[in-house]
Amino acid sequence: MPKKEQDPNIQNPQAKKPTPPKKPLSSYIFSTFLIFVVIVVLYSLFSGAGADKTPTVSLSDVARLAQAGEVKSIVVNSQDLTITKTDGTIEKSEKEDDTSLVSVLSSYGVDAAHLSAIDISVSTQSGFVAILISLAPILGSILIFGIFFWLLTRQAKGAGMQAFTFGQSKARVTDPNDKNNKVTFKDVAGAREAKEELKEIVDFLKNPKKFLEIGARIPKGVLLAGSPGTGKTLLARAVAGEAGVPFFHLSGSEFVEMFVGVGASRVRDLFKMAKRAAPAIIFIDEIDAVGRVRGGGYGGGNDEREQTLNQILVEMDGFEPNDKVIVMAATNRSDVLDPALLRPGRFDRRVMLDLPDRRDREEILNVHANKKPFGEDVNLKVIAERTPGFSGADLYSLMNEGAILAARENRKKISQFDLIRSIEKVMIGPERKSHLLTKKEKLIVAYHEAGHALVASVLPDADPVHKVSIVARGSAGGYTLKLPLEEKKLQTKQEYLDDISMSLGGYAAEQLTFNDVTTGPSNDLQVASSLARAMVTRWGMSDAVGPLALESDGGRTMFGQPGVEKAYSDETGTLVDGEVQRIMREGLDRAKEVLTTHKVVLDIIANKLIEVETIEQPEYEAILSAHGIPLKKLEI
């Protein structure tokens, strides 16, 4: 059975406006050249379109028209002549610039009587206009190249300013008066103990005098630790919303740059901004990106990450009691943080956020049910009971997927069936109905899943089965959904052994039925092997190895120096490997024993799966009851 993956998500996500990227210099050069070409083309088009279409005649033709009395007037503009004939038509001509029009016409034989009948006028331009017209091409070229160099200078100036602002903080600030993005404790369902812890922070930000007068100092740093999707960022925003103070938010990775010292500079700038806006909250998400244990031997004292961490330590230690600046941080791995961060005076208050229990899950579902139309059959209490291990982000995704399924089928309301299907979609993945199996493959998958289900139902400490299906979902060819009768914080050794046998039930069913195995149990083997190794190396559940913790929760060796793969001897490693193999063999033997004893029930479940593909809990329990297998019920 594939393990459920948890996708980190925030319940009420804040919309962020993306910062437009800076344009490269090449784009400005290309744009300027393109503008220059467009101007030249447009000038050519308009100058050609607007060119004077008046016909041009020679001086001899002008003299002939004047002698014939067909010229009414002539306007002389330097060497250009504009002739208006007696019939109203206009023609153009030219003469030499230094000669008189009258002398030119007289030389062509026009007598004085005809010349006196023509209205000759001279049009002159001012010297400034004439000079401007003559210099227009040069001035236009200078203007275009001036714009081009101005754009280049502007880009260079921008690059220079970026160099000066490289060390400035990139924190995003949420205004306390922004009602659209304001989050309060009412918007955070569940996490009751965490909210009680954080109410003191809110009280201090609202009324610091009450604490200072009695000599109390509020914790300077609050570390929110927990699994992904449990609402760490949402709680930090809720503290800022309740207190009504500015909220400076950024990720730990935003401090780290290629150049040493940039992260430290950004830390200084961030704390300077927060002190100016005090009272305020600084929130550093995923602080383990810069807050990991120092002394790893990578980069020495000039390592950028260590420089940034050192600056954070200095800034937090330099606070005064009346600064009224609270530093909050979130991480999924508090065990990897540097001890200097966790000492009193820095992040000395740690708030753990666990996965929500059944009541918390129902409250979270009610929060996400706002503005969603539900059918009369929807019961969120049932959904909360069927989602153990779900985080707040998983529940948000579940409600959203239910709404998407209803909209896809053109329904106006969300039904209980939509939410049930969404549980499996979030846990395992979407259905792959197009993933067609051959008749033999379908038979193998049916016996595989029937083996999982039957072993889980017979072994006393395994969780009861709620659904068995051979419809492919996600990367799984089929799945067996089992849920605990009640939520438990502690697991016993026998429960883990039964879980290992249940995981190997599909492998055992394939061996017993077909005398062969396929690649189908690959994920089951990984899950069972990891669980068996954790029993030996982390929880002391092996008599041969004894009560020793050889690995941490993340699978790394404990007490080992950086670069050392394990902190125990080869003999101990051999012993661990032998114990893991023994647990796996015994689990497989128990699974085979169950399947052999109840071979008839195994065949019935497998054949039923081939027929209907999915067996729900009532129908499955009816098969068990009919063959004398007791049902698992909660003991009161």
Image (cartoon, helix red, strand yellow):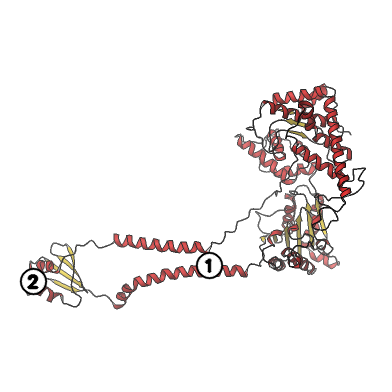
The first of marks 1 and 2 along the sequence is 2
In this view, the mark in front (1 or 2)? 1
Of residues 73 and 133, which is closer to you in this image? 133
Q: CA distance from mark 1 to mark 2?
A: 69 Å
Residue 376 lies, in percent from the top left, at 69, 33
Residue that mark 1 sits on: 155
The kind of residue tagged 2 is: His
Determine whether the residue tagged by mark 1 lies in a helix, strand or loop: helix
Residue 224's disc number? none
Residue 114: mark in rendering? 2
Amino acid at the residue labelled 1: Gln
Q: Is residue 432 visible?
A: yes
Quadrant in which residue 290 is drawn: bottom right
Q: Position of residue 444 (x, y in %)?
A: 72, 28
- SS for callout 2: helix
Determine the residue positioned at 38% across, 63% down. 39
- Rendered position, 531 above or below 568: above
| Mark 2, other Cα within 10 Å: few <14 / some 14–19 / many ≥20 | some
Rendered image quadrant of residue 52: bottom left
Q: Where residue 625 sits in the image (x, y, percent)?
A: 82, 23
Q: Residue, x 69% and y 41% (percent of image)?
A: 399
Residue 528 screen position, x and y as percent: 81, 39
Residue 369 visible at all: no
Q: Is residue 42 left or right of residue 234?
A: left
Q: Nearer the viewer, residue 116 or 57?
A: 57
Crowding at dot 1, Cα within 10 Å, few <14 / some 14-19 / many 20+, comes out as some
Q: Quadrant of the N terminus?
A: top right
